[in-house]
Image (tube, rainbow, N blue to C red):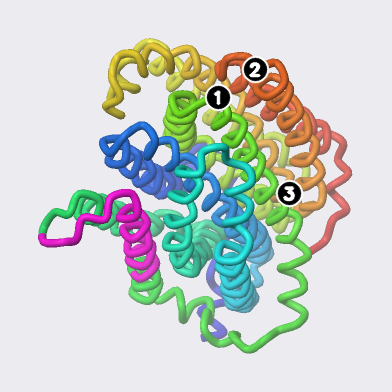
Amino acid sequence: MAGSVANIDLRVQISYRQILKIALPISAAILVPQINFITNNIFLGRLGEMQLGAAGITGVFYLVFAGIGFGLNNGLQALIARRAGEGRIEEIGKIFAQGIRIALFIAGIGIFIVYFLMPQILRHTLRSAEVAEMCIRFLKIRIWGLPFLYMYQMRNALLVGTNQSRYLIAGTIAETVSNIFFDYAFIYGKFGFPELGFNGAAIASIIAEFLGMFVVFAVIHWKGFHKTFALYRHFGFNKEVSRLILVQSSPLIAQHAISIMSWEFFYVLIEHHGQRDLAISNTMRNIFGFFGVFTWAFGATSNTMVSNIIGQGLKERVITLINMIVHLSTGISLLICIILNLFPNFVLSIYGQGPEFVEAAIPVLRVVSTALIIMSFAVVWLNAVTGTANTIINLGIEFASILLYSVYAYVILEKMRLPITWGWAAEWIYWSTMFTCSFLYIRSGKWKSKKI
């Protein structure tokens, strides 16, 4: 076994072909869960505008916890990619196993928060008592999918970090198909299932996350990765490795948590403008997520490739690599922006809310579509910072971006009471700040002395 492991070469090449080889499967893997979000909202939109708006609040609240897992995933991914670039294959299993332990512990904390703290938060921040109680009941069901989601996210770190991103798709397809089926069955009471309405979407999502997790770990076993990387030999507590993961991932966990909490803050401000504006903003979140999948895929590619080539000792090629990824990411986002602005009625009509809703949402869609372009290069540069392993810098960049975003949103939406089109322009400020800080840090070269 030692000899076979020693002969494995997981180093990446700096080429457009290599970038696309990593990014395209990640795009598919990210796209499929976004289809889940959109499906949920299409089904819930048929129940009424209030349910569609409440879905936005619960969705973003749950994304706070999902973002924590995503931050842990990004830290693990950078560590695994660094070891892959260094050729230290035997270390990958240790990192993965300790990552799973940490993820499950965090999931337990998340469940506690939803049951004992979240109800008071929502009751004191939402003006509609009916919407608040609806969200509380939903989230107390939905949160039980968190352990499955975290286990599912850890496979990203392993497969992307070891250049096996093509195997991401199997689990996401299983999750999506099951989510659509059980959404329809539980929300409307089809195929002999009980009609649970709004809460049916929560149960459907839990089942889908479990099946996605099950399938992806089955693939890992089928391809023999559990043996190649000795994934299950190191589940005993390892203080040194756990500390390394926490040092690298904690700033990223905090980064993603405060990022999504700012979205929840944004949605609370939107809720104060009424159900129509809340429902419109929920569709914008879906559109942002769905059409941003390529950007996030290129961001994940930037993280793993930058870390890998640094592990190879090629620090002088980092900026060249980032620029190549940016070319692809921004080109695709420009195309998406053009399509969204040419066919806004078609995109918005799928939510079944009528012509008045569509007319009110089109100006917001135009703001969101241009924000997607700024995001396309900002995310790549930020993930390059993650790849350098200076994750405390990531947190600082996120904090500065969120501060400006939140202040702007509060003044525009709460104090000046301007239309939500102006509120959504906060995305321009957020992504521009993120890009500027990330670009200046990478160009400074201060990351070159960092060792992990």
User: Quarter of the image holding residue 3?
Assistant: bottom right
Three-letter amino acid code at the position of disc 1: His
Q: Give the range drawn in magenta.
A: 192-214
Q: Quadrant of residue 97?
A: bottom right
Q: Is residue 437 above or below residue 222?
A: above
Left or right of residue 182, residue 449 in this image? right
Q: Which of 364 and 133 is in front in this view?
A: 133
Residue ID for mark 2:
417
Please state which of residues 101 and 146 is positioned toward the viewer in this rendering.
146
For label 3, the residue is 314
Q: Is mark 3 on a helix, strand or loop?
A: loop
The extreme front residue here reads: 129
Mark 3 and mark 1: Cα distance apart in space: 52 Å
Q: In this view, does 181 lie to the left or right of 252?
A: left
Q: Do the residues labelled 1 and 2 touch (CB within 8 Å)?
A: yes
- Are there few (<14), some (14-19), or many (20+) residues within 10 Å of tag 2? some
Which residue corresponds to the image point at 60% horizontal and 77% vertical from the top-left?
101
Q: Earlier in the sequence, mark 3 or mark 2?
A: 3
Q: What residue type is labelled 2?
A: Arg
> Element type at marker 1?
loop
- Say whether residue 121 is magenta: no
The answer, for residue 152, to whether it is visible in the render is: no
Identify which residue is drawn at 62% across, 31% down.
269
Give above or below for 308 relative to 1. above
Residue most extreme to the left: 191
* Residue 422 position within the rendered picture, expressed as x and y whole percent measured from the top left: 61, 16
